[in-house]
Image (cartoon, rainbow, N blue to C red):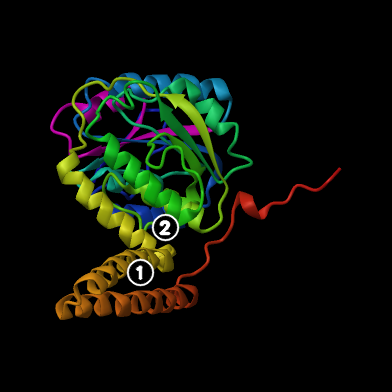
Amino acid sequence: MTIAGPATTPPLNGTAGYAPAAVAGVLAEGRPLAHGFSVVIPAVNEADSVGDVVRRVRQVMDGTGQPYEVIVVDDGSTDATAAEAEKAGAIVLRHPQNVGYGAGLKTGISCARYDHIVITDADGTYPIERIPDLIGYSDRFDMVVGARQGKYYRESWYKEPARIGLGSLCQWVTGTRIPDVNSGFRVFHTALARQYFHVISQGFSFTTTITLAALSNGYFVKYVPVDYYKRVGKSKVKLLRDAPRTTQIILQAIAYYNPIKLFLTFSLACLALAVVSWLLYVLTHSMPVGLVAALFTVSVVHFIALGLLADLIRVRHVPRAPTLTSQRVTPHE
């Protein structure tokens, strides 16, 4: 991975030629985080739009008066993405090959110098002018999410069932209403994201898993409705390829943070099948049907027991994440 940046950006000495993990170690541990905002933009073959996005981000952030930097992570592009981003004034981090959306965000977050992260996409779909609105809540909330709305967010009818199913699952697990579980337009503490790197996905489900992690650990999350625009170029998300991967990551995150609900789901499914099987047995007096009903009944108990055991293991071995904004209590005046 090589690093480049505009003339106004101090050089990151000693990082050229290092693997991303080595760079993350040097930058994350070698200096304290300053107050400000690191805008991280992952990009793959977005030469037509990334320059405009970077310029808009810089214009908007200049208007906030806050310290900031713009980091574009070129995730193995084969076009002029890196050159356009650098020309527009961004710090450019390059992966030698494509490793995923989440991996790009991790690289940018690892190299960030400020204590807050702003993430957005390089394809022009998110309203950059709304960044100050999200930043405005960052002193009271641990994560602020731009909840997408509008016709371009709902335009792919074949993706809608998967989106609804994923959102419903996450809401059931966390017990919290989640207007947009995988929005790529949000603000959060740098420390919050870094502590979850070992469980956060390398792919498109980065935003979903960090949402699950934050809500499962009691962080304060704010949702702000934002418009969603038509993207420049073709989408990198493929439903048949990414839906199974996302489902796998979500199930792993649930097993890590709230396993009893995962096993409870299996238990309820077995209970429903057991009831149906016992009714069929009463009607048919078939021995095979009775055996199936008995197996489903025993499975109910087994899944509940496994869920309790998994939750005990979680309590013992999964460390409670340190609180950030939620640790502060505003005194009454």
Question: Tag 2, which secondary structure?
Answer: loop
* Labelled disc at residue 177: none
**Residue type beneath disc 1:** Ser
> Looking at this view, is 68 or 143 the one in front?
143
* Label 1 sits on residue: 267
Q: Position of residue 151 (x, y in %)?
A: 34, 20
Q: Residue at x 34, y 79 (%)?
A: 302
User: Which residue was labeled with disc 2?
Assistant: 196
118 to 99, vertically: above or below: above
Disc 1 residue crowd, few under 14, some 14–19, many 20+, Cα 10 Å: many
Closest to the observer, 326 or 90? 326
Which picture quadrant has residue 280? bottom left
Q: Residue at x 38, y 25 (%)?
A: 126
Decide which of 51, 281 is in the foreground and name it. 281
288 part of magenta stretch? no
In magenta, the rendered stretch is: 67-92
